[in-house]
Amino acid sequence: MESRQVDGFAEIVSLGGVAMSKFLRILLLSCAAISPLLYAASPAEQQVAEAVKAPGLSVVHLWAPWCSNCQAEMKSGGWSKMIAENPETKFFFVSIWNAGEDGRAMLKKFQIGDQPNVTIVADSGPRRGDDKIKRFLDLPVSWIPTTWIYKGGDLRYALNYGEVSFPVLQQFLKDSNSEWSHSSETATN
């Protein structure tokens, strides 16, 4: 590789095929490494990211009032029952793909929102197009409803497929609260 100094910086004059290939790989890897740093979290995401670091359990539920699957979950009464039965768990209802509206009116219709362990927030992003939110808390978002369980900032369970089964969610909360370790297991060869 030939280069010459210009104002203290190396200027690449010519690169052979192998050197160019290496240069491009390094450039691509560098871009991939810094791309997460270029992502700016919304105020809602920043709020939830800080809150899930608390030592207890946190449930993050991504939803939108216009979504029929989200509406079905609300109509079943599962969320209001889940919130009432788990007062020590923090629940975050994050409205996404809803042009910044938090959907509070629909949540109240189903007795969700007045509980001290419930926080309602809205991502400011649009519902459609290239600017639509595709990540939240550094996890991919491709479908709603989506439900994640955190304990002390660690993701314990991610339900990314749609409507949640409330008995399964209750079991996941129980499992997330239990202390377990593989330290007592013996290795077998």
Image (cartoon, helix red, strand yellow):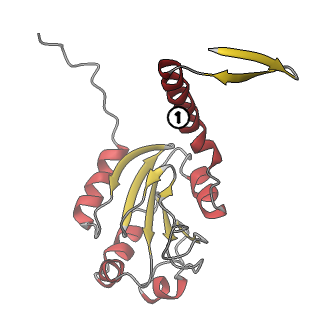
Q: Is residue 89 above or below residue 2?
A: below
Residue, far right:
7
Between 24 and 124, the one lying in front of the other is: 24
Q: Mark 1 — residue?
A: 28
Residue depicted at 35% across the width and 46% down the height: 176
Q: Residue 118, percent across and down?
A: 52, 68
Q: Nearer the viewer, residue 122 or 88?
A: 122
Which residue is drawn at the image coordinates 58% and 21% (left, top)?
Answer: 15
**Residue 14's spot in the image, x, y percent?**
63, 22
Label 1, residues with CA under 10 Å away: few <14, some 14-19, many ≥20: few
| Label 1: element kind | helix
Residue 119 appears at what percent x and percent y? 56, 68
Residue 155 falls left or right of residue 33? left
Question: Amino acid type of disc 1?
Answer: Leu
* Residue 109 in the image: above or below residue 45: below
> In the drawing, does residue 111 fall left or right of residue 116?
left
Task: Give the quarter of the figure containing the N terminus.
Answer: top right
Where is the C terminus found, in terms of image quarters? top left
Residue positioned 55% across, 25% down in the render = 23
Name the quadrant containing residue 85: bottom left
